[in-house]
Amino acid sequence: MFLLGRKALCCAAVADHVNAARSRCVSSFSFFRIPAPHSSNSQRQADLDHVVHNVRSHDPSGYLPGRLLANVTMVQSYYAVRSIWVETGLRFGTTARIAPHSSPEEHLEWWQQQIDRVFDDASSQDSLLEHPTLRLLRSLRQEYNLPWEKERFNTLLQSRRDDLTVMQYESLEDLHKHAEQSCANLLSLVLESGKLTELTNPIAHQAARLVGLTHGLTIALRTSIPVMSITGRIIVPADLCRNYGVKSPRYLLSALGQGDEECVAALQKAVRDIALSAQKHLDDARALQSSIRAEPNGDYAVATLLPGLVSETFLQRLERAKYQLTNRDLRNIGVVEHSKCSMKLISAYWSRNY
């Protein structure tokens, strides 16, 4: 198996990421490809390129942390499971093999059936062989005997079903649950790809849950405006709206509501509560670092939790914007800031922290 040294991996990752920020062409990922094992054919390499492309195109903040994992198996698995999360959430340009004009529910039902087949070794695999992400999941699971828990994939899909039906979560606790269903499970699946199970590395999985909560809440905040525009879903839970007197969150999250200073201030307080909750989960996870390192292959686990740093970068930017989700500076990120974030990740990787 072809492996690059850590210095080459890190330097190539930083150069690749900065180049992407400069060009804004997230699909040009061939500068540094994840190598497929020599034992595999060109199909495996094409499947790997497919999942990396999906993550880099639709989940750019999740791209670089995958480059910094401990070994090639974990890197490949990271992009495979994250691509599943990306592809199951696509409203347009779906990769599911379904009839045109199928409903979002039918889209998710197709994915559920395929995940069932990935984990059913006795069933026919013909349909899996037609889809690169599913084909890669199946080959990784079988080739490396990965201890993935199928229930984690089921929970990911349930979080996508909730995205279709829940227009506003009732409470901050409900929003936490959704973040745990999605991002916390993603991190636990990556841990399992390194043979770090809840039995062997319980503290690492506890930290993955906390960092996953941070990551999920941050993604919800960062995507709140486009999500509301496309789906009508409001990210700020109803209980926070009631507590702070936010009477028209949908109106306030549009350009139309920015003249009402009192209502805008109320919304800022609600958003602040979500952001502070996300930061607290990250702080709690950081308190576990020494315990994680004491577990088997603890350094492998620490590298898995690097997405927490990406989340913190956005939370700090949100604080500087005084928790105004409509502030355009939150999403207009220049090359310099991309570079700083990349170097922050690299530094954390080398110092074994998150």
Image: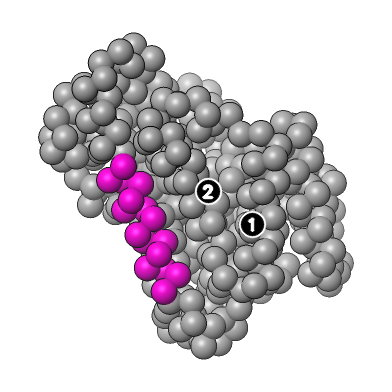
Judge left or right: residue 237 versus residue 207: left
On the image, the x and y values in percent for residue 260 come to 25, 16
Contact? badges 2 and 1 (CB < 8 Å): yes
Q: Residue at 48% across / 29% down in the picture? A: 91
Judge left or right: residue 181 versus residue 25: left
**Looking at the image, residue 32 lies above or below residue 193:** above
Amino acid bearing label 1: Lys
Q: Secondary structure at mark 1?
A: helix
Q: Which region is colored magenta?
A: 272-287
277 within the magenta span: yes
Which of the labelled discs sits on residue 188, or is there none?
Answer: none
On the image, the x and y values in percent for residue 43 come to 79, 52
| Magenta span main SS | helix
Judge left or right: residue 274 versus residue 101: left
Which quadrant does the C terminus fall into?
bottom right
Which quadrant does the N terminus fall into?
bottom right
Which of the labelled discs sits on residue 344, or is there none?
Answer: 1
Closest to the observer, 186 or 16: 16
Mark 1 residue crowding within 10 angstroms, few (<14) / some (14–19) / many (20+): some
Q: Tag 1 or tag 2, which sits nearer the N-term?
A: 2
* Residue 155 in sight here: no
Q: Secondary structure at mark 2?
A: helix
Judge left or right: residue 324 versus residue 123: left
Dot 2 corresponds to which residue?
313
Q: Residue at 59% across / 37% down in the picture? A: 58
Label 2, label 1: how far apart the Cα atoms are:
9 Å
Colour approach in the figure: one colour
Q: Residue at 82% across / 67% down in the picture? A: 7
* Residue 334 in sight here: yes
Amino acid bearing label 2: Thr
